[in-house]
Image (cartoon, grey):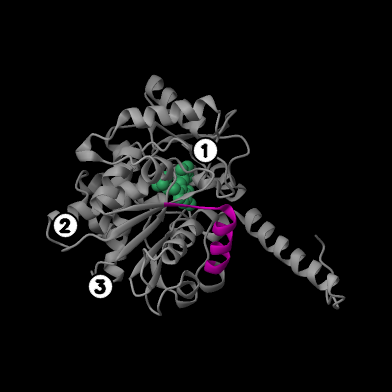
Amino acid sequence: NPLDFSGVWRFRRLLPFAPDDQIVTIGEGQTILQQSDPVGKYVGMDAGRLHLQYEGLNPSGSFKDNGMTAASTHARMVGAKIAACASTGNTSASLAIYASTTGLFRVVVFVGSGKIAFGKLSQALDYGATTIQIRGDFDDALKQVRAVCAEGGIYLCNSVNPFRLEGQKTIMYRVLEGLGWEVPDWIVVPGGNLGNSSAFGKAFIELKKLGLIDRIPRLAVINAAGANTLHELYEHKGLRWNDGRPDQSLIDSFYTDMDERNRRAQTLASAIEINRPVNLKKCLRALDACDGVVREVSDAEILDAKAHVGAGGFGCEPASGASVAGARLLRKQGIIAPGDRVVCILTGHQLKDPDVTVGYHAAESNERLAEKLAGGGVVERPFSN
Ligand code: F0G
């Protein structure tokens, strides 16, 4: 069965919403769990304990394809002719590739002004999506696209779409498979709109209920410091799932305060530059089920971690570096032990955002150059920037 070649649909009995002949697949989910001692050493782990789940190997280069194959399937089931999303780049690239390869629907994407890495934007354009740049950032774009979809009967493919999350559960199935169904101690994932973390929690709750695992790993969700709503609410204000009734007044007053100060998300990890995560409550449920923690890391920590992944792993985009930076922080804080088995999710391909990568290394070499000049050292090669 060709569905068994999809890293998502070979698990279709665990996401049983579509008949086989309706399933839309482009061979997503052929991803790799890589054990990396160099990155493990950087994080502070014992040898053999750190694993990187590299989702950059998906057809559009990010984990989004795990969810988009499921959303596209549902869109086909309901006969959608147009699908839309707001995006920091990867969701739009993913939706656009499903539309261009299957011809099932047309795609409209909304992106914030200057808020999207060119690798991702170029994908949406090449795949033929109608791409609309709005005045504002991702949070504004999502608000607008939700309104447009509701008014125009357009199929919405952001992670508010529950079918997306069904597909993203399979990332955890593949991690478990890669570990021979040994449950790791920690899953560490970057947090933006909080779709992944929500999906992972749901996957573990269900697997435990089905008796396929006997315990649930701990979940660490890592925000960029400049886009840290979850960290603020969970770690500082004590917001919890609370049996399905999280304190809404806490959430409301947080957002009111944010609006009054006109506080905008800001991080070089543009994929997770999000201040109003739509899956906040679902993520609280995941954190509850997985005895979770939330941390924030600076852009400098993210880029440093990303460079170490490049030097000792397959590489990743900036947002993905947050998971490694977060694991390192939790190791330093003694919350992750050196002998724990830790899986960091690398959500996107290294080539998604070359500008940030080149900028980082150019700044590094300029610093080294300045040091050499200050010390009167010989410079072998002039640096053009
Ligand atoms: N990493 C990458 C590479 C992403 O593109 C995103 C989200 C995340 C992490 C955060 O994942 O939303 O499940 O918490 N990107 C979205 C987009 C928002 O539009 O491409 P999350």
Which sits earlier in the primary sequence, circle 1 or circle 2? Answer: 1
Closer to us: 82 or 161: 161
Q: Position of residue 1 (x, y in %)?
A: 24, 60
Q: Secondary structure at mark 1?
A: loop
Q: Which residues are magenta?
A: 295-309
Residue under numbered circle 3: 180
Decide: few, some or many residues near mark 3? Use Cα within 10 Å; few <14, some 14-19, many ≥20. few
Closer to us: 156 or 373: 373
Tell whether position 302 is magenta. yes
Q: Is residue 83 above or below residue 183?
A: above
Residue under numbered circle 2: 208
Decide: few, some or many residues near mark 1? Use Cα within 10 Å; few <14, some 14-19, many ≥20. many
Mark 3 vs 1: CB contact within 8 A: no
Mark-to-mark CA distance, 1 and 2: 40 Å
Which residue type carries mark 1? Ala
**Where on the picture, by quarter, is residue 183?**
bottom left
Q: Is residue 61 visible?
A: yes
Which residue type carries mark 3? Gly
Identify the image quadrant of the C terminus: bottom right
Which sits earlier in the primary sequence, circle 3 or circle 1? Answer: 1
Q: Nearer the viewer, mark 3 or mark 2?
A: 2
Q: Position of residue 370 (x, y in %)?
A: 81, 66
Q: Position of residue 142 (x, y in %)?
A: 46, 32
**In this view, which residue lies farthest toward the top?**
151
Q: Residue at x 49, y 61 (%)?
A: 325
Any mark on residue 129, and which? 1
Decide: few, some or many residues near mark 2? Use Cα within 10 Å; few <14, some 14-19, many ≥20. few
